[in-house]
Image (cartoon, rainbow, N blue to C red):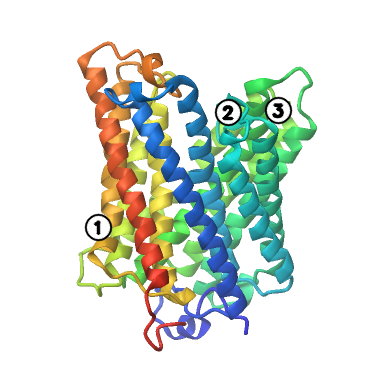
């Protein structure tokens, strides 16, 4: 039986202004969503292992344990690609698979397997010859056949997921207004992913022959990397609306306004093909146009949705045990994302304030998606997380990341450079050392929070489900 992303009967019966939530799914949809969830967990486990090494390699007093210069960069490449690219794509696949009409399930299953194979290859690449570390923005790489081949396999799997999602997703116009608004949000994230894939291919085909090394990959991933940020932003907005409704909040946005917010979040992604048509991909104009589109267009929908969700969640109300982890994830996500936005306005120069800014943005998206995972677990046939650990996990992760971010901001004020570690950081004063020490402490706390997320989810997967709990 094919089930919709949202329950239409409840949508028609509920009061105006209520946002409607996923209720029941078919067996094929549930199995596909579970596969994407497992891939996301696998990526987080791998990213967590490398993040431990990252934090240690930059923390004063511990960094001497490792051959830092080379080791730090290799670990950073794998950590970034697993924790941002793979985790986010897996969550997009999980969410979109829940609204699919299974027209071509072999295609959908092939997408998961290709992405899983590519992820495993990227994880193993440092131990199989690696390659030169090239710290390109958005998708850093190891310039060796294993890593690059694995990245291509992952891209192929993502392309199949996008193709299947676009061809099989239900049309929002056929649903109740509130249902259609959230379906549009899920579809919009896939459209942004499609634009990103097209941009990557376009850059590859028109790449200037004289570019190589880091400059080559910087130009290759610049256009598509910006489009990816729109996809992740849309997923975060969708997650905020889901989590607020799951906690009993009445978001004061009509279905038409919700749809408009998603449309605003998506609209600027279409600057990407114009930038390719109007300017050479290696030009300053091309680079600046894409940056401007992300800065201006990327934030148009965020503030209104954040404000509406905040008002919906206020004043605090008594919640069921299964709702409290969702509330914790929602508040933590919005707080850290807002912090990243404020730090973005303080950036000057090429120092560690830059990673502080994008850490806030990325962690905000990650926390929102963690909350969505908690919400969807019982809908996928698992137990609903309701333990004290589940309630504390998002807060602990957010506190750790906040300390990590503030440590970077502190050190950035003294000019500590990004993408360096160990002696290359040139920590001259006690204040610089203290800032990076706070960064290290926060990173370790965040790692504990990330580990707890995996523990909570796996416990829910292994716990017996009471009769009638599966939906």
- Give the left or right position of residue 457, taking residue 41 as reference: left
**In the shown orientation, is residue 321 left or right of residue 337?**
left
**Residue 247, position as x, y percentages in the image:** 31, 70
**Which percent across, then down, holds residue 5?**
54, 73
Graded by Cα atoms within 10 Å as few (under 14), some (14 to 19) or many (20 or more), the crowding at tag 1 reads some
Observer-nearest residue: 88 or 270?
88
Residue beneath label 3, please?
281
Kindly tell me whether residue 204 is visible in this rendering: yes
- Tell me the number on the disc at residue 392: 1
How far is disc 3 from disc 1 in space, using C-alphas?
46 Å
State the SS at label 2. Answer: loop
Q: Where is residue 79 in the image (x, y as percent from the top left)?
A: 48, 39
N-terminal-most mark, 3 or 1: 3
Helix, strand or loop under label 1: helix
Left or right: residue 73 versus residue 320 is right
**Does the image show residue 251?**
no
Q: Residue 136 carries which label?
A: 2
At 61% from the left edge and 71% from the top edge, which residue is drawn? 172
29 and 308: which is toward the camera: 29
Q: Give the residue drawn at x 47%, y 82%.
A: 471
Quarter of the image for residue 150 reads top right
Q: Do the residues labelled 3 and 1 touch (CB within 8 Å)?
A: no
């Amino acid at each position: 039986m094919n089930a919709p992303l949202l329950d239409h009967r409840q949508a028609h019966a509920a009061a105006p202004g209520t946002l409607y939530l996923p209720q029941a799914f078919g067996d094929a949809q549930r199995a596909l969503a579970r596969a994407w969830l497992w891939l996301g967990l696998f990526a987080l486990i791998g990213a967590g292992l490398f993040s431990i090494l990252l934090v240690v390699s930059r923390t004063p007093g511990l960094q001497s344990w490792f051959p830092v210069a080379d080791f730090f960069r290799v670990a950073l490449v794998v950590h970034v690609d697993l924790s941002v690219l793979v985790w986010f794509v897996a969550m997009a696949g999980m969410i979109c698979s829940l609204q699919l009409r299974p027209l071509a399930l072999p295609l959908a299953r092939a997408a998961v397997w290709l992405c899983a194979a590519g992820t495993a290859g990227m994880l193993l690449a440092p131990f199989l010859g690696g390659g030169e570390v090239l710290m390109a923005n958005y998708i850093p790489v190891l310039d060796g056949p294993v890593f690059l081949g694995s990245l291509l396999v992952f891209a192929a799997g993502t392309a199949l997921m996008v193709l299947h999602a676009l061809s099989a997703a239900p049309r929002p116009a056929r649903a109740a207004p509130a249902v259609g608004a959230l379906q549009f949000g899920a579809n919009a994230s896939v459209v942004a992913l499609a634009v990103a894939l097209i941009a990557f291919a376009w850059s590859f085909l028109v790449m200037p022959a004289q570019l190589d090394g880091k400059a080559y990959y910087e130009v290759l991933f610049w256009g598509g990397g910006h489009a990816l940020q729109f996809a992740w932003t849309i997923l975060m907005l969708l997650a905020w609306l889901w989590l607020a409704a799951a906690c009993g909040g009445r978001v004061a946005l009509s279905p038409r306004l919700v749809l408009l917010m998603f449309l605003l979040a998506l609209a600027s992604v279409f600057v990407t093909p114009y930038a390719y048509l109007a300017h050479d991909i290696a030009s300053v104009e091309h680079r600046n146009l894409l940056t401007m589109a992300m800065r201006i267009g990327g934030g148009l929908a965020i503030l209104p949705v954040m404000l509406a969700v905040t008002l919906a969640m206020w004043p605090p109300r008594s919640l069921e045990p299964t709702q409290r982890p969702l509330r914790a994830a929602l508040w933590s996500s919005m707080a850290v994302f807002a912090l990243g936005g404020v730090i973005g306005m303080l950036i000057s120069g090429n120092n560690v304030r830059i990673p502080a800014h994008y850490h806030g943005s990325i962690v905000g998206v990650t926390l929102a998606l963690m909350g969505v995972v908690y919400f969807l677990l019982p809908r996928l046939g698992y137990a609903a997380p309701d333990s004290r650990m589940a309630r504390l996990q998002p807060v602990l992760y957010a506190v750790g990341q906040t300390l990590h971010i503030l440590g970077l901001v502190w050190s950035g004020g003294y000019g500590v450079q990004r993408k360096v570690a160990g002696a290359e950081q040139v920590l001259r004063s006690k204040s610089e050392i203290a800032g990076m020490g706070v960064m290290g402490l926060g990173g370790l706390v965040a790692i504990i929070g990330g580990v707890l997320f995996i523990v909570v989810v796996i416990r829910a997967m292994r716990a017996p489900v009471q009769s009638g709990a599966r939906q």
